[in-house]
């Protein structure tokens, strides 16, 4: 509301509603033809006069009068669905007092989605910190021997990093917009926080389509290696060997944990986030975009985003400090043969048997083409 175009829009609504009120109270206009009655202006008193001096531009008394009047809709020449509605229709929810749909959405967001979603993220961070404290980085150090296997092609890495960058931008902007008033607003103040959230809101809106496209590419690229098989049941039964001191459970290119992350941490919540985000960005042709629809889309979007962020915290942990050598695989595309055998033995065996056509270093396979990037 602090920005120029928003103020102009609101002033236009207020002027139009006021004009309608005047037309309805004029003697020449029959009362039976009026579709709505404008909200009564609040009576001037000492409180309002003091507010006008100390808080110029604060129009809370007007909106309070509109809400208390019971007016549902006025007339305006502005375009858009529900263009004449200032206060949404009143509804009675079980176990609650009479309220309007907008206030109901606000209560659900502030009393359920924000506190429980924030708790979920904090629990995920705490659980990973405890896991790292007790287990430390998993796996062994694998010194460079020159015998390397290409784990990710340049195209796969590009798709992954573009999607990861888009997700990071969306996650940071979403967290600031949802939780920033608790940890940023007291530090930087309302003015800077207002401009920051306005900037991040636009970043969120424009990066969303990039995330949708890159997510589609990632899913199509990696889906063939994330189909469940019998060996995944053994991996799940033994939790991949992560909870004990034994060796890693053999797996193919991706183990059962990674496959679960692909489907339930990326695909399912990703599709929900993209679909609801398209509604919020008004990118679906022919949709009326009523306020009630936008409320539902926002709640679904927020819940799916919280779940996806909590799940991907585990993916980020395992891909960086949780497993030795995992980050190097996505940075360079190449891993040591010993790393592949330790973490994905079935995949390594298929490569040695020639069942999977991947590039190998000259020391590993003299007939292979290409050369690995340095480092792991």
Image (cartoon, helix red, strand yellow):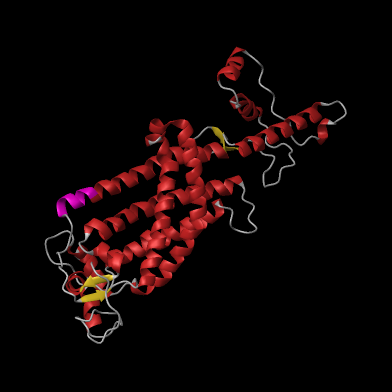
Image point (22%, 77%), residue name = 348
In the depicted structure, whether residue 178 falls above or below residue 307: above
Q: Position of residue 232 (x, y in %)?
A: 26, 70
Q: Using residue 17 as the reference point, say whether residue 229 is left or right of it.
A: left
Q: Is residue 339 above or below residue 6?
A: below
- Quarter assignment of residue 314: bottom left
What is the magenta range?
Answer: 129-135
Q: Position of residue 371 (x, y in %)?
A: 27, 77
- Is 20 within the magenta? no
Question: As drawn, is 52 to the left or to the right of 349?
Answer: right
Where is the C terminus found, in terms of image quarters? bottom left
Residue found at x 52% / y 48%: 202
* Nearer to me, 32 or 360: 360
Task: Report the front residue among 286 and 170.
Answer: 170
Foreground residue among 90 and 365: 365
Which quadrant would residue 256 be assigned to in this image? bottom left
Q: Does the magenta stretch include residue 134?
A: yes
The total number of labels drawn is 0
| Quadrant holding the N terminus | top right
Q: Which residue is drawn at 43% across and 31% down?
A: 189
Q: Where is residue 351 in the image (x, y as percent from the top left)?
A: 25, 81
Question: Residue 326: horizontal and vertical position, in percent?
Answer: 25, 64
The reply to whether residue 73 is visible in this rendering is yes
Magenta stretch prevailing secondary structure: helix
The answer to whether 263 appears left or right of 208 in the picture is left
């Amino acid at each position: 509301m602090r920005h120029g175009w928003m103020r102009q829009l609101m002033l236009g609504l207020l002027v139009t509603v006021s004009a309608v009120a005047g037309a309805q109270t004029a003697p020449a206009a029959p009362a039976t033809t009026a579709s709505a009655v404008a909200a009564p202006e609040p009576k001037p008193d000492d409180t309002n006069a003091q507010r006008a001096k100390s808080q110029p531009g604060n129009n809370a008394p007007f909106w309070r009068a509109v809400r208390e009047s019971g007016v549902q809709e006025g007339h305006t020449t502005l375009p858009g669905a529900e263009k004449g509605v200032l206060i949404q229709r009143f509804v009675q929810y079980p176990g609650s007092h009479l309220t309007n749909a907008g206030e109901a959405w606000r209560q659900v967001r502030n009393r359920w989605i924000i506190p429980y979603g924030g708790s979920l993220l904090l629990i995920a961070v705490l659980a990973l910190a405890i896991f790292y404290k007790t287990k430390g980085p998993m796996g062994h150090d694998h010194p460079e021997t020159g015998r390397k296997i290409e784990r990710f092609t340049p195209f796969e890495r590009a798709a992954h990093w573009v999607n990861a960058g888009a997700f990071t931008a969306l996650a940071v902007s979403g967290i600031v917009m949802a939780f920033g008033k608790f940890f940023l607003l007291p530090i930087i103040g309302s003015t800077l926080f207002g401009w920051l959230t306005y900037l991040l809101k636009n970043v969120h809106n424009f990066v969303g389509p990039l995330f949708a496209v890159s997510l589609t590419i990632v899913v199509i690229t990696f889906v063939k290696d994330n189909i469940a098989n019998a060996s995944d049941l053994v991996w799940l039964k033994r939790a991949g060997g992560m909870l004990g001191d034994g060796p890693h459970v053999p797996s193919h290119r991706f183990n059962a944990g990674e496959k679960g992350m692909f489907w339930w941490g990326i695909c399912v919540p990703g599709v929900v986030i993209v679909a609801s985000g398209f509604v919020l960005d008004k990118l679906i042709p022919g949709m009326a975009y009523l306020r009630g629809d936008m409320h539902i889309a926002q709640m679904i979007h927020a819940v799916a985003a919280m779940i996806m962020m909590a799940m991907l915290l585990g993916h980020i942990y395992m891909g960086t400090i949780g497993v030795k050598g995992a980050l190097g695989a996505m940075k360079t595309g190449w891993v040591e043969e010993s790393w592949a055998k330790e973490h994905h033995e079935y995949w390594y065996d298929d490569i040695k048997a020639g069942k999977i056509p991947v590039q190998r270093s000259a020391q590993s396979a003299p007939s292979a083409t290409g050369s690995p990037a340095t480092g792991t």
